[in-house]
Amino acid sequence: MGIMPLLRRRESAAPSPSPAAEAVDATAIRDVFVARQPIFDEHDRLFAYELLYRSGTQQNFANGVSADQMCTDTVLHAVLSIGLNPLTNGTLAFVNMTRDFLMRNLYELFDPTTIVVELLETVEPDDEVVEACRRIVRSGYPLALDDFVNAPGYEPLLRMAKIVKIDVLNRPEEELKQVARELLPHGVRLLAERVESAEVRDMCRRLGFTLFQGYYYSRPQIVSHRELSVEHTTMLRLLSMLDNPTATDTEIEDGFRSDPSLSYKLLRIANSAAFGGRDVQSIGFALRMVGRKVLHRWLSLLLISSVASSSGIAGELVLAALVRARLCELIAQRTERAQAMGPMFLVGLFSLLDVLLRMPMEGILSRMAIAPEVRAVLLSRSGPYAPTLALVEAQERGDWQAVQDAAAAVGIGAGDVSKAYTEALAWAGERIGAA
């Protein structure tokens, strides 16, 4: 099947997708899930959400999944796929961290004002962990201890923690009173988790607990999002390049330009709160903003998270997106608008994201800050880049009268557009073949 039938199908008013479209959906995208459970203060005001691993809309427990994998998937989905702000509505997020996450400083992927680092109860307080927690606190991240049971060796962590979570389910008042006596002198806030009745909440309040979480308030709410899969070979190649000091920024940028999904995720990273990115103009701009070190961390997480998913990106639609991106770029170059080559590449690359993700373009772009000119053409085919995209789409359709009219409006000959289209096809085919 060629590119044109797929693109024409997009414009069809058929009420149900064809078998081919369903096949594209099955191989190009996957649904990801994160659960959130609210945490309230002593005045029943929302304080934060804890983010929890889920593998489906009905999956309330993680069977056969390691703690590291759960943390990895939750972090990736919370930031790259769903977005932290849609999950928390601007409040704090409690993010579980394993020992591996601490040792790799992966908490640095978040803005310290947006999360509480929640150290899992399975993490032993050895010297390396204590030092890692010191780095966390020095960097401005609040530290919470999950399912805490006081024991020798935990004193250094208690001195650094802001919040200590205590499982209060089916525990008598005298036992919890003793827990409060031991921990409150450390200056921590006590969080009662697994609160299932008003009576338990009131008892914990009397004992000095000031944060509360459990089924009495709310069960975890599962949030889902549809995202593109990512080719493992592409990520491995990029990870190798990022590790290679002789690899140029241009080579790395070219690697991202070959994969719409990775390009989209890169812009999501650049626009996260941790980087404060606004009006990202190009892939190169986003790469410079994020930096190689942080980018290597993200790609490592993506690779780990996607190992279990063997589905690839739908070849025909990805090829079409790459052709559009390169053709938009070549037209900008040949109409003496070289300064717009980066933005025009993004316009072409992202112009099919709604088809790849099978969700409205407005919903996709709402999760990322992108240059207004790029946003305008993707949402409403308006703005300074719209004529070039209209020309590219006319060339795809084989509407030669529209090509002539659009080419004249852009300032390029129709014959030059056809030559550029051939070049774009060859370029995109090479990228697909190398992936």
Image (spheres, helix red, strand yellow):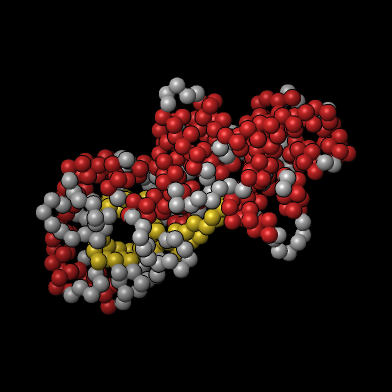
Residue drawn at 17 percent across, 69 percent down: 176
Using the image as rendered, state which of residue 338 and residue 243 is in the foreground.
Answer: 243
Number of numbered callouts drawn: 0
Q: Is residue 374 visible?
A: no
Using the image as rendered, state which of residue 370 and residue 72 is in the foreground.
Answer: 72
Please tell me whether residue 47 is drawn above or below residue 253 in the rendered image. below
Would residue 150 appear left or right of 298 to someone viewing this image? left
Would residue 415 appear left or right of 426 to someone viewing this image? right
Residue 392 appears at what percent x and percent y?
76, 38
Using the image as rendered, state which of residue 124 and residue 244 is in the foreground.
Answer: 244
Residue drawn at 74 percent across, 31 percent down: 422
Give the quarter of the image for residue 368: top right
Residue 307 appears at what percent x and percent y?
44, 48
Residue drawn at 25 percent across, 66 percent down: 167
Using the image as rendered, state which of residue 92 and residue 368 is in the foreground.
Answer: 368
Give the quarter of the image for residue 377: top right
Q: Is residue 61 visible?
A: yes
